[in-house]
Amino acid sequence: MKPITIFKSLAFATLICTILSCKKNNNNEFTGLGKVNLEFDNMVGNQELELNTGAYINANGDDFKITTFKYRICNLTFNKADGSKTLIPESYLLIDAADEKTTLQTISDVPAGDYVSMDFVIGVDSLRNFAGAQTGALDPAKGMYWSWNTGYIFVMLEGTSSKSTAMDNMLMFHVGGAKAPDNTIRKVTLPFPTGGLRVRSNAKPEIHLYVDAGCLFKGNTNINFATLSGFMGGPNAVTVANNYAMGMFSVTHIHN
């Protein structure tokens, strides 16, 4: 065989190997399991949430401060462009604005792939809500639980307002309830920014979630603190849950 022919044959073989290798690497990108970080940025409108010291105005024009802000989410689901969904088992999270460690949560065992949005439930699904004593984020000792019969508090906001007629101008909004007519379980779908979420077995992307505490008090019904300064479940909790389901959570950006 002539030298030039040998050279061409080797070059062709190298090209084929390169193509096959690239194809193999690309396929490998979408195999295995990865991890995803969720970072919760607690805000009130466009202001950073500062417990005890931050001064805010609700949609009704009422001043308020926040001393406690906690919330639960569960049943995280990552969605692909083709409509397929991946539900993450046992994805029950409790975020406490007073505990910085809880504002960064790591989700493990996410199948590698490209995702365009995510779903989750604000609260605790009905099955687990009434399942009795549990552990981890669902441990009643976490302080977000009423009793074995009424179940978990889904969102807790406490504070003060000069407009509140309660003792010491207190605000106490404890949203919960998983039975009609006072069911406050709400599901939200959050689209991802352009580029989506790219999960790989050798990387840990991070989703930044904007969480607006002010959304409890605006939306379908603007809350007037002079007439509603607090509750523990019930029909008023449904009103507030309908409010925050409209925009309390959004994805601002993703680090892939």
Image (spheres, rainbow, N blue to C red):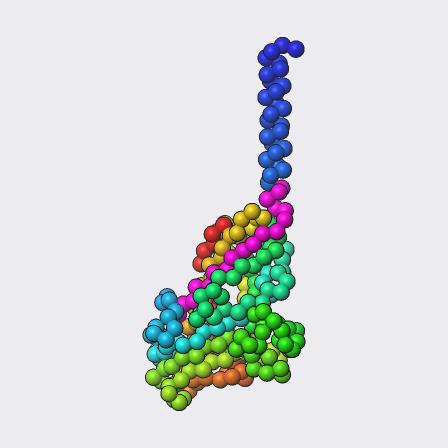
Instruction: Return the residue found at the far top.
Output: 2
At a point 52% along the width and 77% down the height, the residue shown is: 143
Residue 161 location, x and y as percent?
Answer: 36, 82
Q: Magenta stretch? A: 27-45
Which image quadrant is residue 65 in? Answer: bottom left
Total label count?
0
Residue 236 location, x and y as percent?
Answer: 50, 83
**30 part of magenta stretch:** yes
Q: Considering only vertical position in the picture, is 232 above or below 9?
A: below
Q: Is residue 239 visible?
A: no
At a point 62% along the width and 29% down the height, the residue shown is: 17
The dominant secondary structure in magenta is strand
**140 part of magenta stretch:** no
Which image quadrant is residue 98 in? Answer: bottom left
Q: Is residue 100 left or right of residue 16?
A: left
Residue 16 location, x and y as percent?
Answer: 62, 28
Q: Is residue 67 left or right of residue 123?
A: left
Q: Considering only vertical position in the picture, is 73 above or below 37?
A: below
At a point 47% along the width and 54% down the height, the residue shown is: 254
At a point 60% along the width and 32% down the height, the residue shown is: 19
Q: Is residue 158 left or right of residue 127?
A: left
Residue 245 location, x and y as percent?
Answer: 51, 71
Look at the image and tell me in which quarter the N terminus lies. top right
Q: Considering only vertical position in the picture, is 196 above or below 27?
A: below
Q: Is residue 155 visible?
A: yes
